Each structure stands twice: as C-alpha cells, then as structure tokens.
Amino acid sequence: MLRLADGVVPQPDLVVRFGDLPTSKPLRRWLAELPVDVPQVHVRDDASWQDPDGALSDVVVAAPRMLLEALAPRLAHGGPDPDWLASWQALDVAAVAAQDRLLDAGSEATEPWLARELTALLPPSSTLLVAASMPIRDVEAFMAPREQVRILANRGANGIDGTIATAWGLSLARDPGDGPVVVLLGDVALQHDVGSLLAAGRAGVDLTVVVVDNDGGGIFHFLPIAEGRAPEIERHVMTPTGLDVAAIVAAAGGTLHAVGDRADLLPAVRAAVTEPGLSVLHLRTDRTANRELHRQLEQAVRDALAG
Ligand SMILES: Cc1ncc(C[n+]2csc(CCOP(=O)(O)OP(=O)(O)O)c2C)c(N)n1
C-alpha cells in the first residue's frame, strides 16, 4: 500500500524510529520522501548513523526502553488520536480487499497468488526463507498478517546465490518442536545453488523447496528495458534457464510435487512438510503475464486508495 499511496496516507508530525534500518523498501522510500519539516529521530543504543536515504534529523543514543519510560510521563498530550490509526487501517483494508478480489477472480496459480496462499498454508512454527528477486517482493505485498510463522530472508547480501544452502542450515539448526523449513525461490536462484540441492538430498535434510519457475529472471520485466524487448535482452538479461526441474529433483533424490493448478498447492504443501527428506514443489508461471498481473494489481490498489 505504501508504495502506491502517494498523498493518500495521513502524514505524521514526527517519526521516531527504533531498531535497525527497516527491511521494507516501500517503507524506506516512504520515509525518505516525507517532507523535511517532519522530524525523523532514530533511537539506538550505539552512536552509528544508519541513514542511507538521508532522512534522519537526529540520532538519540539511549536505551530505547529507558528513554520511553522517562519520556512517557512528561508528554503533554490528550491521548492518542483514534482517527490516525483508523484511517491507516481503513486504507490497508481497502488495498488488501482490492488485491484479493483480483487474485480470487483468477483461476491460475500465479506468483502473487502463490505468495499469498503459501504463507497462509504453512503449519504453525514453520520457517519460510524467501529468496531475493520477486519472491521477497511478492511475500511483502501479498502475504496476509499471521502468527506462528517465521519469515527470513538474507539481508544485506541481496544475492540470489546460496539460498538453498541457507535453508539447509536453517533446517539443521532447528530446535525440538520447531516446524518445517520451507524455501521459496525462483528458477534462476535454484540454478545458482543446484549444488546445495544435490547435497541436501544426499544428506537427507528435511527441507521443502518451492520453485517458482518462470524460466528466467521475472524481476527484469519490471525494468524499462523489458518494454518491446529485443531478443538480446531476453537472452542476456532475462536469462531463460530451461531447467529440467524434475531431472534435478530426481538427481537429488528428492520428491517432486508439480503444482499445475491452484488445487494442487494444499495437498502438495501438506505432503512436503510431513514427508522426510527433500521435497520440491514446482510451479510454472509466465514472466510476461506476471508483469501484467502486477500492473493490474497495482492499478486496483491505486483505485481503491483513491476511492
Ligand atoms: C549472485 C547474484 N547474481 C546475480 C544477481 C542479479 N539478479 C537479481 S534478481 C535476478 C534474477 C532472479 O531470477 P529468479 O531467481 O528466477 O527469480 P524471479 O526474478 O523470476 O522472481 C538476478 C540474476 C544477484 N542478485 N545475485
């Protein structure tokens, strides 16, 4: 919503930030684009200035809890403004409803649909590792808030390499009682880390790999160079992988679950997270149609926010 909410969401008088730099790019951009007369203060317990966008007006070096406890009684205010939160919530509800209407109207297992459904279907105590590129963007945009699932992504290192190795490590590092580990990634990310998949299969690691196979880097369709694209762009930027996922899974000794349509997802997830060893869900999508669907979703949200 924040990415599409130009001038619609209520503007703050003051931003007080705790903790690390926000991971969400739309949130960071929104903060960076607030008018300069909205002070933005970062409270942290060391003096480092984490502000790549130049949005901060001040850094307060203090233990956040102690600072808040000392400040709260001294704030002269008339209590929270109920309209502020309510207007944010109303916009959020409208944006999500608009997205959901469009996703529900379709019948294909698309990438945004998968992000929404997979995150809803995961059993309690699951860990979902989300790869760079469209998976992390789609999970941020389409996942409904829920509890009992841990969502992780490699931060700082935005590489698509090593994603399966990370998931493997997460699986091995589980404590008793922790749920399954699932990794959501594209076919190029899979190609970059096929070695880890083979090794994970050989080592008998319990892992569910969900491959969104749009035969290349779907994210690059969101770049201006994708318009009217030349064969060279298709070959050298989109980089179709042509992966034979079934053969790779067979070589890794894993179990393949082809997700051909929407109805296949639930039984595939159920089977994958309960069977031992390596399971791979394979969903084929179309990069060009995916770009168009995102355009429609963005327009639906813009219309809902404007209305
Ligand atoms: C190690 C590494 N090489 C190259 C890139 C540049 N890069 C970013 S996204 C991407 C394509 C990813 O394709 P895929 O994993 O299939 O996901 P999709 O874009 O289809 O969602 C590439 C090559 C990168 N981030 N990391």
Image: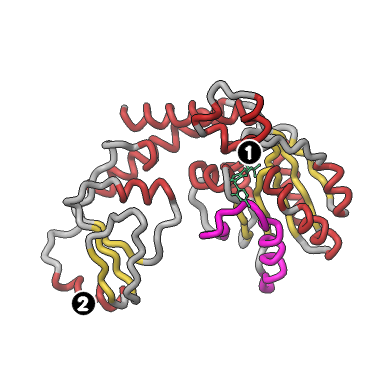
Residue 21 lies in the magenta-colored region: no
Q: Residues within 10 Å of mark 1 (few under 14, many from 20)?
A: many
> Mark 1 vs mark 2: which is more N-terminal?
2
**Image side of residue 71 versus residue 98, left or right:** left
The amino acid marked with disc number 1 is: Gly
**Quadrant position of the C terminus in the picture:** top left
Q: Observer-nearest residue: 256 or 26?
A: 26
Element class at badge 2: helix
| Residue 49 percent location from the top left of the image | 33, 67
Tell me if label 1 and label 2 are in contact, CB under 8 Å. Answer: no
Q: Observer-nearest residue: 121 or 38?
A: 38
User: What residue span does the magenta drawing correspond to?
Assistant: 150-177
Mark 2 within 8 Å of ligand 1, using the beta carbon:
no
Displayed quadrant of residue 124: bottom right
Say which residue label 1 marks. 217
Mark 1 within 8 Å of ligand 1, using the beta carbon:
yes
Q: Residue at x 37, y 42 (%)?
A: 2
Residue 222 visible to an observer of this rendering = yes
Which of the numbered marks, if any, corresponds to residue 70? 2
| Residue 231 percent location from the top left of the image | 66, 25
- Check the image and name the residue furthest to the top: 228
The amino acid marked with disc number 2 is: Ala
Q: Residues within 10 Å of mark 2 (few under 14, many from 20)?
A: few
Number of the front mark, 1 or 2: 1
